[in-house]
Image: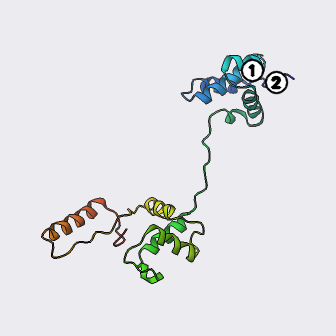
Amino acid sequence: MRLFVRPLTDDEQRQVEQLRRSADAATYRHARVLLLSAQGQTVAQIVAAVGLCDRQVRKVIHGFTQHGIAALPRRKAPGRKRLCDPTAQTALAELLRRPPTDFAIESATWTGADLAAVARQQGIAPALSARTARREIQRAGYRWQQAKRWSAKEPEYERKKAAGALGRARAGRSQLGAGV
């Protein structure tokens, strides 16, 4: 069975010619397939000219028949759905503002694992891992830092304290307390 693209209108012909000049290789090949098919070449001849398999050539022609010019440019794959929506991200940031001891965690600072466990218990994000919790906090604009403990008896204490405050002021980011 032979497969050809339907006759192109003048507007479609112009748009396909523009897409044929695309820097994206896939878009260029798709436009070329359509132009060759519109010239009356068979799928086998198009395969030899373009270097795609016959299934892909047929897929491009069918896609154009069903969706028009919109089927030609390369589309980005949607990827995996994010685990935290903006409300969950805000709720995670609110959790960080509370001390871990409020949730029976024997630590002065939050860890990714502790934050993920509390978020699951609170129903914020049921499938949250420690890595995802840290990533979502980072996406919200916060930095995950190891807590810095300095002793007031240290000779360099005042210099370190001043440098830390200056760094936070330059970063312009909200500091959520020790550990974050």
Can you name the residue that lies furthest to the left here? 155
Mark 2 surroundings within 10 Å by alpha-carbon count, few (fewer than 14), some (14 through 19), many (20 or more): some
Q: Position of residue 111 (x, y in %)?
A: 43, 69
What residue is disc 2 on? 3
Q: Amino acid at mark 2?
A: Leu
Please identify the quarter of the rendering in which residue 149 is found.
Answer: bottom left
Q: In front here: 111 or 99?
A: 111
Residue shown at 51% from the left, 61% from the top = 132
Q: Give the side of residue 108 with respect to residue 57, left or right.
A: left
10 Å crowding of disc 1: few (<14), some (14-19), many (20+): many
Quadrant showing the C terminus: bottom left
Q: On screen, 14 above or below 159? A: above
Q: Nearer the viewer, residue 118 or 91?
A: 118
The three-letter code of the residue at mark 1 reads: Ser
Q: In the picture shown, does residue 34 fall above or below 135?
A: above
Residue bearing the label numbered 1: 37
